[in-house]
Image: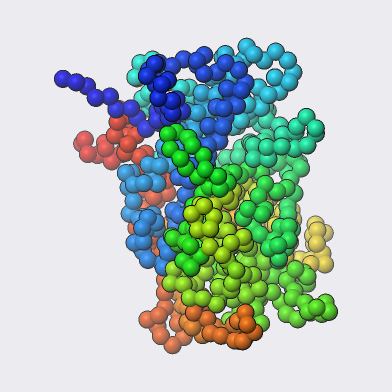
Amino acid sequence: MKKILIIPLITMGFLLTLGGCEEFLTETNPNEITADLFWRDLNDAETGIIAVYNSLRNPDLVNLRIDPCRADIGVPVERKQNAAPTGIYYQRTYNSSDGDVLDKWRVLYTGIFRANQVIEGLEGVVADTVDNVENLERWNGLMGQARFFRGLFHYWAYLTYNEGSVIIVDKTPEGEIDEYYRALSSPDSVRAFFREDLRAALSLLPQTWIGDDGSEFDLGKVTRGAAAAYLGQSFLYEASYSNGVGQAGDINYDSAMHYFDIVMNSGYSLVEYQPDENLPNGTLCTTQDELNEESIFEIVYDNSYKEAEGSVYLNGATWAGYFSVGAQGAFTTIVPSYWTIMAYKEDPMDLTDERNQILDDAGSFVRYRGNEGLSASHINRVNLRLSMSVAITEDEDKLFYGSKLAERRSAQAPYGAFRKFANWDITTDEKELNGGRSGINHRLMRLSDVYLMYAECLINGGSNDGGVDEALVFINRVRRRAALELLGESTNPLAEFPTAQHNETTYTALQLMEHIQFVERPLELCLEGYNSRQIDLRRWGILKSRLEDLAQRPYYVNSPSYTYRKSDGTTGTSGSWVVNTGEHPTNPNSTRNEWVVAANNHNEAIHNYYPIPTNESGVNPNVQTDEEESEEQ
């Protein structure tokens, strides 16, 4: 009887990396290839690192169609509970054999295998070629990148699957097939492993990549700042929380701040947002503001075609098409939740900041940014962070794909759309850009994220009132660059912008923590990072209660009662609807709710993390899920 060999999913990265050359495959069994056939010098190691970066580019790694629906940021298009492919994640009806569960695991472990190959090549054959200072620096840089990515991919697997109990792959398998079957490791072991890699990267990587002429190059390469940021984040994520409040004196806060201090002293700086998209920093998360002075780590995309692994694909992502409105060549999949839209709308602007003011040709004040106020019952002030993150009907001062959202009716996104990661600023139709693919980099880590995590550490997650004043400094830096009203009292000795508009409120640590949780982090970092919002809600211990709270909140929309100024100067009534909080004033049947099914279905033991995917557990005898154990019994 012929035996059929099934290799577990985590080994596929190894096989894929070796693939792509038919003649080569006919000469040598890929399972028997030795390192010295590949890693002869540092140029080979450079090629290997490129393969690692390409794993990062895979759109299944950071899936912006699905990740926001697992938190509270986005909902399926037209707010249909069962809209494919996001509906099962929004409703919490997915299982271990569904697409995103399988795909993330595959991409993460492909990246791990590729990083391991580079590490082993550098440690072995390539190490013999390091014969001068220049080559040693190059070797350190390559090893630092490989260790960073092996650690990062393990870290993300730890954050995503099985409450952190995942497979550690510390070398490429060779020899007997048993080496391909790895058992699950404890969360503590996984955590110790990825931190060791990230610490090694921190010691090996440069802060910037400097060329022979002294100029910076390869801005998309990972640096020691990224390693420090993720080390700090990993300690903050381990801090203990109960019902959204941290434990006073938790040593994880001190450890996190140590690494965040390294980041904040590494030359990064916040950029100041501008209202005009044609000016520097006039957009957020588009092609125009990539790899700027605030950027710590991004997934670098472009619109070119590239052949790899036997197929032709685009180096771009598809998120722009998923976020834009149907009339702009989109296949809209996900839109902002009602809560997201209202949270942006309710965040007050700094009326004294000139960036929020519309002036006439003589320089005289006319009104504040937003609209002319032709609809008396709707807001006429739109803050700059809202305007750069989402598109809403009331925002008439910032066009969306060349026109006002109010000027057209779209059944796919009548209430609003995401601006982030969409090409609204450079085209009127996404299909003009390589058939809907986009070159916008995904922002994984920015300085504003570090500032907000640092503020959370200072107040010990809401339990240390002694850290409030200093925490306000970092929060207000983030708000000030977006021309938002600042928090706290303008007379506070630590206030860095005393002449700016403050809300003149005295905060406790708990109140400030709630602001971080429900205003600052979700609005500043909307859609960014690696599934950041879902992980935040989970680590604070409030993911289930958050969904239950949102499911009880009523909303209604006005249609078509919003009056706006047309491009020809006349007035019109908008077909794009306006979201409001509360019960519908005249028709209770028109009151709407979100997250109802999600709140009912969400089981913290099942849905806080993804399960180990079936095409790993089903073939790996050393990995068995709780579900499989119960079936055997």
The image position of residue 363, as x and y in percent, is 83, 77
The image position of residue 223, as x and y in percent, is 67, 36
Residue drawn at x 50%, y 72% is 415
Q: Residue furthest left?
A: 1
Q: Is residue 430 left or right of residue 262?
A: left
Q: Is residue 129 above or below residue 477?
A: above
Residue drawn at x 26%, y 36% is 629
Residue drawn at x 39%, y 50% is 607
Coloring basis for residues: rainbow
The image position of residue 562, as x and y in percent, is 54, 83
Q: Is residue 7 left or right of residue 360?
A: left
Viewer-nearest residue: 56 or 108? 56
Total marks shown come to: 0
Residue 561 at least partly seen: yes
Residue drawn at x 58%, y 61% is 427
Q: Is residue 272 above or below residue 631?
A: below
Q: Is residue 221 left or right of residue 85?
A: right
The image position of residue 550, as x and y in percent, is 46, 66
